[in-house]
Image (cartoon, helix red, strand yellow):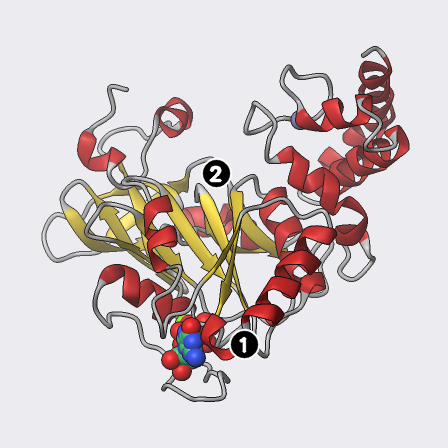
Amino acid sequence: MGQPPELVALGWSDWHAQRANCAPPDGVARVAAVDRDRLLLLDQDGPFQARLAGRYRHHHPLGQERPCVGDWVCVEKPSHEALGVVHDVLARRTWLRRKSAGSEIEYQMIAANMDCVFVVQSCHFDFNPRRLERYLVMVMEGGAEPCLLLTKTDLVSPDTLAAQMVEIQSLGITAPIVPLSNVSGDGLDQVKRQLQPGLTYCFVGSSGVGKSTLINALIGNDRMETGCVSGTGEGRHTTVRRELIRLEDGALVIDNPGMREFGLLGADSGLANRFSHILTLASRCRFHDCQHSGEPGCAVAAAVQAGEIPPEALEDFLKLREESAFNDLSHAEKRKKDRDFGRYIKSAKKSLRNR
Ligand SMILES: Nc1nc2c(ncn2[C@@H]2O[C@H](COP(=O)(O)OP(=O)(O)OP(=O)(O)O)[C@@H](O)[C@H]2O)c(=O)[nH]1
Ligand SMILES: [Mg+2]
Ligand SMILES: [Zn+2]
């Protein structure tokens, strides 16, 4: 691949290199943590602190334009003890984000450039298939690979767990599901086996489901703060900071504070529900960024052709996705896009009919 191995170990890839335009003396670094305008960055020489350039802040007021954990940035490194200065945020290959309250065009970034998102839910107090679907929609929208982790299996009977697995599968969710217990250790090896050096894994899910406990088990020590052990399975709100760390075996993991609400695609409109089948199929398309509009190896198109998905459902889905991308644009861009939009839908429909 020709990229510096120290950066590849941090998740750097050809994809990013092709899109990076950092002019010297700036170099690239990865965001490990964010505290307002103060950033903890990692590069080939290790961690260092930086601030966001005032000029960048001024020109990029929206939440989604600000660096988040997992981002790659262009940074002018500090000479000695001084802070580095971040001048740009590089294009994101994948992301997790939610709508900012009260804004049509603004998003709050959760994390970026992860290869896989572990959606963590407890099979005890937290089990909720509808919520799982909402998380899945959020993951798929950002282009990362989802995997479901059902924690605290030590607190339910094998029958209950089996019924929960069936319930999830009956919703058409095809993402892999790993049941596990941080207490008994069951399932931990299965998670470990999935982790690969240089790839980034993000953990999301409600507070108290055991995300940090699991990450500690993967690290092999108690680096992450967790709620105190409680027999009821009810956790305490503990993780307050999003943080990217590197495990000994080279995998990169991002812990997250528990999330309560998801503002996505207009919240509880039932959309996640309707399209969960398409979204899960999309993870099997040949191309990671498949638009399901005529690309080769498109699993969604194949399902339409096989009669598993009504063509109208896919048309609705494409339309909705376009609208949600639409929310990212400035108002001026929107006016232009408005005119192109009808044409886009027409051609997407046409390419579907032609198969
Ligand atoms: N019985 C049981 N308890 C667990 C398991 N995993 C975690 N816990 C407990 O659940 C509580 C919450 O665990 P955390 O790891 O802090 O949960 P979290 O998902 O990181 O929570 P936030 O940081 O608030 O988002 C702690 O008391 C853990 O000891 C498990 O598999 N079984
Ligand atoms: Mg935590
Ligand atoms: Zn596709």
- Location of the C terminus by quadrant is top right
Q: Report x, y in % for residue 254.
A: 38, 56
The total number of labels drawn is: 2
Q: Is mark 2 within 8 Å of ligand 3?
A: no
- First-in-chain label (1 vs 2): 2
Which numbered tag is attached to residue 92?
2
Residue type of the residue flagged with mark 2: Arg
Residue 160, above or below 76? below
61 vs 36, left or right, is right
The residue lying at 29 percent from left, 46 percent from top is 251
Q: Which residue is outermost to the top?
A: 354
Residue type of the residue flagged with mark 1: Val
Residue 242, above or below 324? below
User: How many residues crowd around disc 2 within 10 Å: few (fewer than 14), some, or many (20 or more)?
Assistant: some
102 vs 286, left or right, is right
Q: Report x, y in % for residue 16.
A: 39, 30
Which numbered tag is attached to residue 218?
none
The residue lying at 33 percent from left, 63 percent from top is 215
User: How many residues crowd around disc 1 within 10 Å: few (fewer than 14), some, or many (20 or more)?
Assistant: few
The residue lying at 58 percent from left, 48 percent from top is 139
Residue 64, above or below 3? below
Q: Quadrant of ligand 1?
A: bottom left
Tag in front: 1 or 2: 1
Q: Report x, y in % for residue 310.
A: 88, 32
The residue lying at 66 percent from left, 43 percent from top is 328
Residue 150 seen in this snapshot? yes
Residue at disc 1, secondary structure: loop
